[in-house]
Image: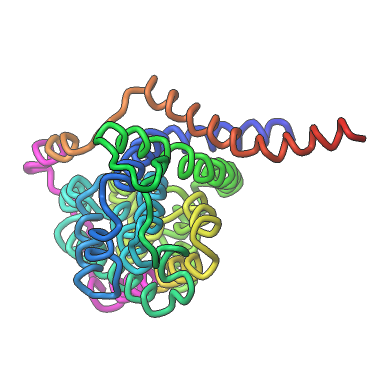
């Protein structure tokens, strides 16, 4: 039992190490966005159900190399700054699925056929999820209280803040109002993800990836949705599986659902935005990824031949690596400790109440 617990904690910390730097960067960006971008301007851009707003959110997300954990603060920050649910979900879907580095690696390792399907799907699925969010959002269509103008966090009403004040108060909002609750749910999700990785052997995933059947396709869609997968880091892994005989549709499905979401993100989304949002997001993502994989295997690439061309690979990989921010290990550990500390801090009010009750008793 202790051995299992140790493996789960180590696996969870390893996953957190891969996402913690982007989480901290996202807390900073979310805080600055919250105080530097006016509510009125954000309402004009993303506070509506227009298709153009979904396109803006999707395209901007496709250009950012941020993982599905790192996008949580940015997406939630957008939502609580005035963006409607549709644009928020489109941004939170597109950002981790695809970016310039992932696309370059996909064309090198997976070939132009799979990479083109990956590119088209990386745009179409976020748009579809955004449309579903706008149509089915209900009371979660926009954050409560945003019908009235929102004052800048940490500043008194009627006071014209300086740029420095905006920056300081934005960072305070990003790490306290946003960082504390998000870190709590991320830590919980990381532990659950570590448990899944420990209990589900890699050989089982490879077996499913190597089978073109509908049952394995559905299983991979669901499994990918709860696992933490980095779109950039997993492309060579998926390419190796495809080269060894895995169905191309299964590879795309796993990359789409695995990169777009995971347990920490779903738990954070559930607690920060609402249950309906999780159902829309996960439901549309799993179904659409399953459909893309099924159509790829049956109609788009029925006689697929694995692709791997060494010509120009080194230069392209070097270009892709130049677009990827690789944080030094000490920085990753520091950011992981920050996330864990913020998560533990969120538990302090409950611990304090228990201590007070114990004193009274």
The front one of 242 and 68 is: 68
Residue 7 drawn above or below residue 329: below
Q: Is residue 111 left or right of residue 179?
A: left
Q: Is residue 25 left or right of residue 205?
A: left
Residue 140 drawn above or below residue 268: below
Let me know if residue 197 appears in the view.
Answer: no
Residue 296 among magenta residues: yes
Tell me which colouring the rendered structure shows: rainbow
Q: Position of residue 183 (x, y in %)?
A: 51, 41
Residue 3 drawn above or below residue 188: above
Q: Residue at x 51, y 70 (%)?
A: 276
The quarter of the picture where residue 126 lies is bottom left
The front one of 198 and 229 is: 229
**Which residues lie in the magenta part?**
288-317
Q: Position of residue 258 (x, y in %)?
A: 40, 55
Q: Position of residue 69 (x, y in %)?
A: 42, 46
**Quadrant of the rendering where the C terminus is positioned:** top right
Furthest residue toward right: 361
Q: Position of residue 25 (x, y in %)?
A: 34, 36
Let me know if residue 61 appears in the view.
Answer: yes
Q: Main secondary structure of the magenta part?
A: helix
The quarter of the picture where residue 317 lies is top left
The front one of 29 and 315 is: 29
Residue 224 drawn above or below residue 176: below
């Amino acid at each position: 039992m202790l051995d299992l617990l140790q493996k789960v904690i180590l696996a969870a910390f390893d996953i957190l190490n891969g996402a913690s730097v982007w989480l901290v960067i996202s807390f900073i960006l979310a805080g600055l966005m919250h105080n530097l971008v006016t509510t009125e301007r954000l309402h004009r851009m993303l506070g509506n159900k227009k298709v153009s707003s979904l396109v803006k959110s999707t395209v901007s997300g496709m250009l950012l190399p941020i993982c599905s954990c790192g996008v949580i603060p940015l997406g939630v920050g957008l939502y609580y700054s005035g963006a409607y649910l549709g644009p928020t979900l489109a941004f939170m879907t597109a950002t981790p699925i695809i970016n310039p580095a992932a696309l370059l690696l996909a064309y090198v390792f997976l070939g132009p056929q799979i990479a083109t399907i990956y590119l088209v799907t990386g745009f179409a699925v976020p748009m579809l999820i955004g449309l579903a969010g706008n149509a089915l959002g209900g009371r979660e269509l926009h954050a409560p209280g945003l019908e009235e103008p929102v004052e800048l966090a940490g500043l008194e009403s009627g006071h014209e803040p300086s740029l420095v004040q905006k920056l300081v108060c934005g960072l305070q909002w990003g790490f306290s109002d946003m960082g504390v609750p998000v870190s709590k749910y991320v830590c919980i999700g990381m532990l659950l993800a570590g448990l899944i990785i420990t209990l589900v052997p890699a050989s089982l995933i490879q077996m499913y990836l190597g089978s073109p059947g509908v049952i394995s396709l559905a299983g991979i869609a669901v499994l990918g949705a709860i696992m933490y997968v980095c779109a950039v880091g997993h492309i060579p892994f998926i390419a190796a599986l495809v080269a060894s005989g895995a169905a191309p549709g299964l590879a795309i499905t796993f990359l789409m659902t695995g990169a777009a979401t995971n347990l920490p993100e779903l738990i954070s989304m559930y607690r920060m935005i609402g249950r309906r949002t999780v159902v829309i997001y996960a439901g549309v993502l799993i179904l659409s990824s399953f459909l893309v994989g099924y159509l790829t295997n049956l109609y788009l690439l029925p006689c697929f031949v694995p692709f791997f061309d060494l010509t120009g690979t080194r230069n392209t990989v070097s270009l892709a690596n130049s677009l990827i921010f690789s944080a030094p290990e000490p920085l990753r550990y520091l950011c992981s400790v920050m996330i864990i500390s913020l998560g533990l801090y969120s538990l302090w009010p409950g611990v304090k109440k228990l201590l007070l009750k114990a004193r009274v008793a």
